[in-house]
Image (cartoon, rainbow, N blue to C red):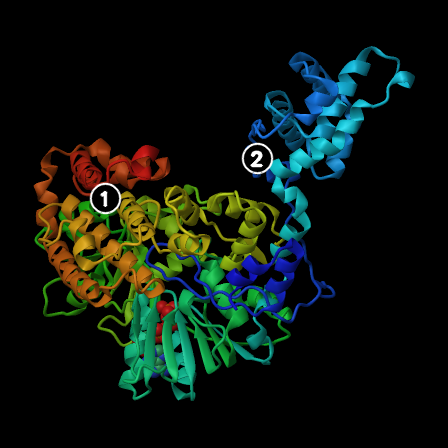
Amino acid sequence: MSIWSSINRCCCHGQAVRIAQNVHLSAVYRIAPHRTHSTLLPTWTNHPRPHTMSVGIRRRWKSTNPELISSLFVPVQIEPATNSGQGEDIGEEFTGKLNRDEVLKAMNAFYRRPEMKRLAEEHGLDSRLFHQAFISFRKYCVKSQTLPVELHILLSDLIQSQNLSPSAQTNHIDDLFPYFLQHAKKCYPHLECMDDLRQISDLRSPANWYPEARQKQRKVIFHAGPTNSGKTFGAMEHYLKAKSGIYCGPLKLLANEVFHKANDRGVPCDLITGEERRLMNPDGGSSSHIACTVEMASTQVAYEVGVIDEIQMIRDTARGWAWTRTVLGLCVDELHLCGEAAAIDLIKEMLLDTGEDLEVKTYKRLTSLTISDRALQSFDNIQDGDCVVAFSKNDIFSITRAIEQRGRSCAVIYGALPPGTKVLQAKNFNDPEHGTNVLVATDAIGMGLNLNIKRVIFYSLVKPTVNEKGEKDMEQLSTSQALQIGGRAGRYRTQYAEGEVTTFRPEDLATLQEIMAKPIEPIETAGLHPTAEQIELFAYHLPKATLSNLIDIFVGICQVDDSVYFMCNIEDFKFLADTIQHVPLPLKTRYTFCCAPISRKQPFVCSIFLKFARQFSRGEALTFDWVTSQLGYPFAIPDTIAELQHLENVFDVFDLYLWLSYRFQDMFPDQERMRATQHELDNIIHQGVSKITKLIQQANLAQSETTDTRQSSSNTSRRDSGRNRSQPEGDAVVEPVKDSQKLTLKSQILTRRPRGSALLNRK
Ligand SMILES: Nc1ncnc2c1ncn2[C@@H]1O[C@H](COP(=O)(O)OP(=O)(O)OP(=O)(O)O)[C@@H](O)[C@H]1O
Ligand SMILES: [Mg+2]
């Protein structure tokens, strides 16, 4: 029996909660940000454990301002009662018609009574809710053509006795309270079920959500060390030798690499990502080993060995929950965690709740990595094996152009490129015969690609980030990030076994040395996330609330042990929920749609997402022909940067389709055709990237102005001023992609948006 049908069969709130706790819920999909995947995330267990505090351990629960919470509850509109015309108004028959002004007077007298406010507070109505509910109640009483008989009579009595002495009054103004409260509960259904809501959103013991894992006493080993120290290699040896194993990686590329490595070693291994399932067993059964993206890991299937790679991602504000879930939930005998030592204490803290110990294995870097004492200063000084790292696409394009103007060919890698393109660009760069011996990249190279880099050159030390609230920030690189990116230089057993790190600008060099010399800050908290079941239960209690409002309420009232955990940000999810709010879909379907791995910063993809939801809600299958007709198919090799970027978005639409096709097979029937076409598109994008300088030139860059460059590539005044002081002319100041080009992209996207879409209305 699914939780959904359980809930529908329940008639009382308490029962719904009990059922949720007793049934071990089937897996559900969870949100994943851009280019990541959905997952299975069980919530409730049949082994509830009291929330005891571990002795001697600092524990604190998140406390939220109650007024902030109350502002999340949107009142349900109560319409005034109309006369059904089926008979007389009995109240009016008894006491006559009520005088509207007198009713208002009585009501206002009620509102002014401090005792009423206090009483309301005892029933969960703070002053804000009391005020809102009173306004609604007053309007209802004044505007209704017919009122409940008792209320009508009470109001009539109150009006008549207004001028009498208190002893002569038969009724008191306070007698209105029960009627008011009844009305308030209709306006704010949560008043009836706040305890249940708090219980549902109690996230203080996430270790108890995984009964299968808790039945094992897992051996947990942390492979800690810097980049390129053989951590993953060490853990993989255990994985490959085991009878069964699960590898959980942060990227499709890494899962893919393990998938190939295992199968090449004769260990049958399946690949599972949000958009792909590759099963090696011809009869469709599962192999003994699985390589998956972390969000896709099952916590119910038992394996001998589990590997969780890049464990430091547990602090990621958007995806951290997926690492938390696998650390607590993988049902394995032996669990290997690979990553920065900065996560060791946090993992130890988490394992206090599972009763398991942590064994730490430390690694040393396999090759040397030195910080240069000279900045690059000029692109004239670029050498074979150099990788220039920048954090904005505009910088990437400008740098590429500047280097190619000097007669060198560049490989280019940034996050929005499809995986195939990234791999091919990396391959060209790695191949000494290819003639592409310089790489220009964002921190997308930080994980997953094997690159023959000799020297990493930081073009900038400031990176755009998203904080816990989902807001964009500009931040100086952390030590962890600088080591992660810089550590790509001098990879073991590659052409360049000795790595070097430097900056482009001399004035950044000291800062880089300082950043890289600092110890990595310990990771203090791990991400958590509400689950589909929890949101479903909220929806059961608050049926009139929108999905995005339900999420807000959940986050507002949930209880988290914030000495160990934090709530991940869910802005993309909420944005998607708002985008399709007006499309009629069952809640579970709506929830799954909103878990799709797309970012709100991709307007074109979001507009297609809305079209998908509309088509789906009409019950019409999303065929290859229908989808590609929305996307300007067939695709051509891009001639401009704008076209290239548009194709990158189209690629993400294919990902969206494939992701949904695994959740709603009947409605997304053309999975294989879409996959084949996406593969072609990957090639087309790669061809576009390979002639990127030509694309940039199309934008008539000659007219670009130096001041534009400052805006696009500099994020600190310190760096700006330094550059102007000391850079050789025409070098540090690389020209940005022109604004006119950005406009072309924008207009292209706009013309492709559906008319009247929510997104257009938003803008
Ligand atoms: N003992 C070993 N024998 C052979 N090759 C090894 C050994 N240890 C590591 N390598 C190779 O060295 C390279 C780096 O190792 P690995 O990827 O495990 O490092 P890592 O510490 O996980 O790095 P990162 O932090 O970048 O993930 C890989 O190509 C790996 O195959
Ligand atoms: Mg590794």
Q: x, y (%) of residue 36?
A: 36, 60
Query: Where is residue 543 shown, x and y percent of the image?
Result: 54, 46
Q: Which residue lies furthest to the top in this view?
A: 163
Q: Residue at x 24, y 70 (%)?
A: 496
- Residue 97, percent across and down? 68, 16
In the image, what residue type sits under mark 1? Asn
**Placement of 218 over or under 530, stated as above or below:** below
Task: Specify the amino acid type for callout 2.
Answer: Pro
- Examine the image and state in which quarter residue 457 appears: bottom left
Q: Looking at the image, which is closer to me, 200 or 494?
A: 200
Tell me: is circle 1 under 8 Å from ligand 1.
no
Q: Which of the two marks, 1 or 2, is nearer to us in this view?
A: 2
* Extreme-front residue of the structure: 87
Mark identifier at residue 643: none
Residue 365 in the image: state x and y as whole percent: 39, 72
Give the quarter of the figure containing the C terminus: top left
Element under disc 1: helix
Q: Which quadrant of the structure image shows residue 684?
A: bottom left
State which tag comes first along the sequence, 1 or 2: 2
Q: What element carries label 2?
A: loop
For the point 47% across and 47% down, which residue is it? Answer: 547
How many C-alpha atoms fall within 10 Å of the one at disc 1: few (<14), some, or many (≥20)?
Answer: some
Outermost residue toward the right in this view: 167
Instruction: Decide if residue 759 is on the left or right side of residue 148.
Output: left
Q: Distance between the residues labelled 1 and 2?
A: 46 Å
Residue corresponding to mark 2:
75
Q: On the image, which quarter does residue 216 sit in?
A: bottom right
Q: Can residue 231 be seen in this view?
A: no
Residue at 21% from the left image edge and 65% from the top image edge: 675
Residue corresponding to mark 1: 394
Q: In which quarter of the image is ligand 1?
A: bottom left
